[in-house]
Amino acid sequence: MKYSLILLVAILFASYSNAQPSDTNVFGNVTVEKDNRIDVLASKMGEYNQSLSLRKARTGPGYRLMLLSTNNRNEALKLRTALIQQYPEHKVYMVFKSPFLKIKFGDFVEKKDAEDMRKQLLKSGLITGNIYLVSETIEIKPEKIEEE
């Protein structure tokens, strides 16, 4: 009996309660007050994000030169240092695959460019062993955007 009385009161209360007014044609007014500097900041942030995405390095198929595969860390570091000093415009990759350290050089889109660099490295005498051309996914840097 007690539960039926509580249920009856709950049903009556729920039937008379409304979350929204019954007249749906009544709308309130909302006034937004904001500082104009927010719009300026949003436009500058959009320009910055767009320029950042244009300068971002992308990846794609290409070639690298495998210069050295050794388990002698000092030899690998010595070659890496010499390459960075002599060719600062190219990247030098040092990868450890147990038990060997591998030194890879450059990001070349064209095979001809990689072959030319291979010949140049052999002439310089920096590399005494063989230089292998390896097909890999490389970083492709877009051309610098000329600012107006």
Image (spheres, helix red, strand yellow):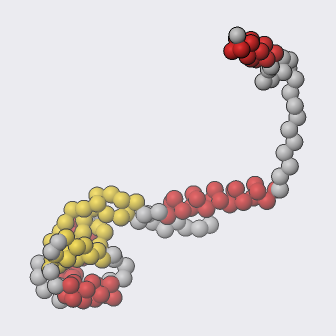
List x then y, in percent, for residue 36. 82, 56
Q: How many marks?
A: 0
Q: Is residue 110 left or right of residue 40?
A: left
* One can see residue 39 in this view: yes
Front-lying residue, 125 or 69 = 69
Figure quadrant of the N terminus: top right
Residue 118 in the image: state x and y as whole percent. 20, 76
Q: Depth check: 43 or 102 in front?
A: 102
The residue drawn where x is 40% and y is 60% is 58
Q: Is residue 15 visible?
A: no
Nearer to us in this view, 94 or 88: 94
Q: Position of residue 82 (x, y in %)?
A: 28, 88
Up-down relation of residue 2 to residue 106 (above or below): above
As displayed, is residue 29 above or below residue 124?
above
Residue lying at 16% horizontally and 85% vertically, measured from the top left: 72
| Residue 143 picture quarter | bottom left
113, 73: nearer the viewer: 73
Looking at the image, residue 67 sits to the left or right of residue 91; the answer is: left
Image-quadrant location for residue 136: bottom left
Q: Residue drawn 51% across and 60% down?
A: 54
| Quarter assignment of residue 99 | bottom left
What x and y, as percent, mark residue 42?
70, 56
Q: What residue do we see at 59% from left, 68% from top? A: 147
